[in-house]
Image: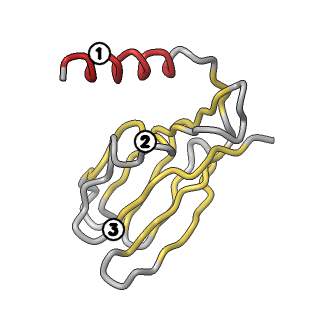
Amino acid sequence: MAGLAIGVFASTSAAAQQPAERGNSAVLRGLDKVNGHNMDVEIPVGGTAEVFGLIVTLSECRYPVANPTGDAFAYLTVRDPLNGEVFFEGWMIASSPALSALDHSRYDVWVMRCKSS
């Protein structure tokens, strides 16, 4: 078990050291878990959008230099529109959305990709 943990840590730290470019926007996908509807939203860096019943702000979006269509990671803040309660704040990774996921009873939001001009 310790070997597995070391292997996961080593691969994670190696991936974290890859050069990354900054995107101008991110494409996010939202899911309403009650009725099964989903939607894609493009948010510019520094911008905010409503995804179903949540307010999502994108602070930054990055992607690997060597593979622009590869794994994206974005810094998001997800809030309640009524009282401003923060449901999620941090980095989400497109290839591993469950690693750092939004914890909401009805809605789910995750990163699909970064876009640049």
User: Where residue 8 sits: x, y (%)?
Assistant: 35, 23
Work out how far the residue at label 1 is from the one at label 3, CA to CA, in angstroms. Answer: 34 Å
**Which is nearer the eye, 10 or 36?**
10
Amino acid type, callout 3: Tyr
For numbered disc 3, what is the local secondary structure?
strand
**Which is nearer the eye, 83 or 50?**
50
Quadrant where the N terminus sits is: top left
Where residue 92 is drawn, which disc sits there? 2
Amino acid type, callout 1: Ile
What residue appears at the point 40 percent right and 81 percent down from the top-left corner? Answer: 36
Quadrant where the C terminus sits is: top right
For marks 2 and 1, the one nearer the N-term is 1
Q: Are marks 1 and 3 in contact (CB under 8 Å)?
A: no
What residue appears at the point 46 percent right and 40 percent down from the top-left corner? Answer: 93
Q: Is residue 79 left or right of residue 76?
A: left
Work out how far the residue at label 2 is from the one at label 1, CA to CA, in angstroms. Answer: 22 Å
Residue situated furthest bottom in the rendering: 35
Q: Which quarter of the picture shows residue 28?
A: bottom right
Where residue 6 is drawn, which disc sits there? 1
Q: Residues within 10 Å of mark 1 (few under 14, many from 20)?
A: few
The correct choice, above or below, for 103 with respect to 52 in the image is: above
For marks 2 and 3, the one nearer the N-term is 2
Work out how far the residue at label 2 is from the one at label 3, CA to CA, in angstroms. Answer: 15 Å
**Which is nearer the eye, 4 or 23?**
4
